[in-house]
Image (cartoon, rainbow, N blue to C red):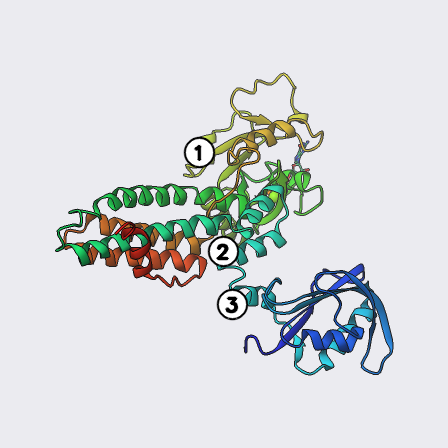
Amino acid sequence: MTHGSDTIFALSSGGLPSGVAVVRISGPATRNALVSLCGGVPASRRATLRPIRSRNGEELDKGLVLFFPSPNSFTGEDCAELQIHGGRATVRAVLATLGELEGLRPAEAGEFSRRAFMSGRMDLVEVEGLADLIAAETEMQRRLAAEQAAGGLSRLYDSWAKRLTHARAMIEAELDFADEDDVPGSVAASIWDDMRVLQKEIFNHLGEGRIGEIVRDGLKVVIAGPPNAGKSSLLNYLARREVAIVTDVPGTTRDVLHVDLDLLGFAVRLFDTAGLRETEDVVEREGIRRTQLSMAEAHLVLLLSDRPDEDWPALAHGYEGPIIRVLTKSDTRDTAWPSVRSDAMISTRTGSGIDDLLEAVADHLPDIEAGSALALPTRQRHMESLAEARIQIERALACLDGLDIQSEYLRLAGQALGRVTGRVDVENLLDIIFSEFCIGK
Ligand SMILES: Nc1nc2c(ncn2[C@@H]2O[C@H](COP(=O)(O)OP(=O)(O)OP(=O)(O)O)[C@@H](O)[C@H]2O)c(=O)[nH]1
Ligand SMILES: [K+]
Ligand SMILES: [Mg+2]
């Protein structure tokens, strides 16, 4: 892909037909395209109503045209947006006209964001945040992604990278000026305190990665229990549609099914599984194997049974994570039945007890203060590089082989951080030495 030479265009709004469709154009031929389509380039950043014409002058539509000159645009290039009527034929005609223009071609998936990254308008973490923001379905997913897309996480990582660079500059200075009498003996000593603090900060941040993953990907809740306990009935009840087959035949469910729920603004991914029992049926056995795999990856298991005298520990089949014990089909029993042996009693026939069950599930959601900034790592990719950065700082702290080796470990730590944001730090150590070390000299 040649960056910066082609001018790209795409329908940037959602499915058609729609009231308004937004066509985005980016690249050096944007002005020419506007002249050809709209008879001129409108004033920058001002919505202007213009006829939109095909190459032979036929009016295809009238719409609002916006021009964003480089570098103050989403991609950093010359950009334009055409807000036209969202009929399929109208949009098709406008896109076809654009495709006929010299130097223009349809954009590839993610190409606008890619250009924004290439031109330095966004770093990788922000690009990922933007992708998450577009995909966000719950309020917490939106908050997490918005913080990341707006650069909250990047600012944190950049501030860490700066501290590493500063530390290396101080070490360099000490190495360079150590033999001069008028330089204090150990300029570098104070930076090790900061490196210890930084190492701890990265450690704590990594500890929050689990929360970030739960917010972004959802709390994984697995419904398990013996055949006919009412597992699929519960999934359907919460999904408000017939996702899973329900019959009175034990062993109905074999494949693991899931639905996504919104619980208090958090995404919850609820899994229905095959009932756990000894069986000779090969298909059912495979289903049970999958149940156990799901349980192993669960954040929470809802253990269901319709037997008030259930042996719950035996039912867990070795799973040791968080469990909510749910007694089902409460409509079939005397309501005065003692509930001491379970955590919730429900009926999917009457709906009784379901709110209490959801409250118990909500207790397992991350504890996030209202209005707080969600600067949490969300991806395995981030976690791996951050862990690498921490290890290199630890090496530098523990190293007894001299300042130059320690400085090298810090350089590697900075590189690992740079991989997260995709910023290859151009460090000018001398600049820092002269601006910070030599003040007053
Ligand atoms: N009375 C009553 N019957 C229920 C309730 N929930 C489920 N059932 C019935 O119990 C039977 C089994 O329900 P399922 O939801 O298929 O149970 P399951 O645990 O998914 O069963 P398998 O997939 O075979 O393991 C069906 O006949 C349901 O109609 C309930 O709350 N009250
Ligand atoms: K069943
Ligand atoms: Mg089932």
Report the residue at 28% width, 49% height from top: 440
Q: Residues within 10 Å of mark 1 (few under 14, many from 20)?
A: few
Depth check: 139 or 39 in front? Answer: 39
Distance from Cα at disc 2 to Cα at disc 3: 13 Å
| Crowd class of label 3 (few under 14; some 14 to 19; many from 20; radius 10 Å) | some
Would residue 345 appear left or right of 163 to someone viewing this image? right
| Vertical comparison of 422 with 239: above or below | below
Farthest residue in the front direction?
440
Q: Nearer the viewer, mark 2 or mark 1?
A: 2
Q: Quick one: SS at disc 3?
A: helix
State the residue position of label 2: 125
Q: Secondary structure at mark 2?
A: helix
Badges 2 and 3: C-beta atoms under 8 Å apart?
A: no
Label 3 residue near ligand 3, CB within 8 Å: no
The answer to whether residue 278 is visible is no
Kind of residue at badge 2: Val
The residue at the point 65 percent across, 81 percent down is 103
Q: Tell me if label 2 and label 1 are in contact, CB under 8 Å.
A: no
User: Which is nearer the N-term, disc 2 or disc 1?
Assistant: 2
Q: Which mark is residue 314?
A: 1
Where disc 1 sits, the SS reads helix
Q: Is residue 131 visible?
A: yes
- Height in image: 154 above or below 46? above
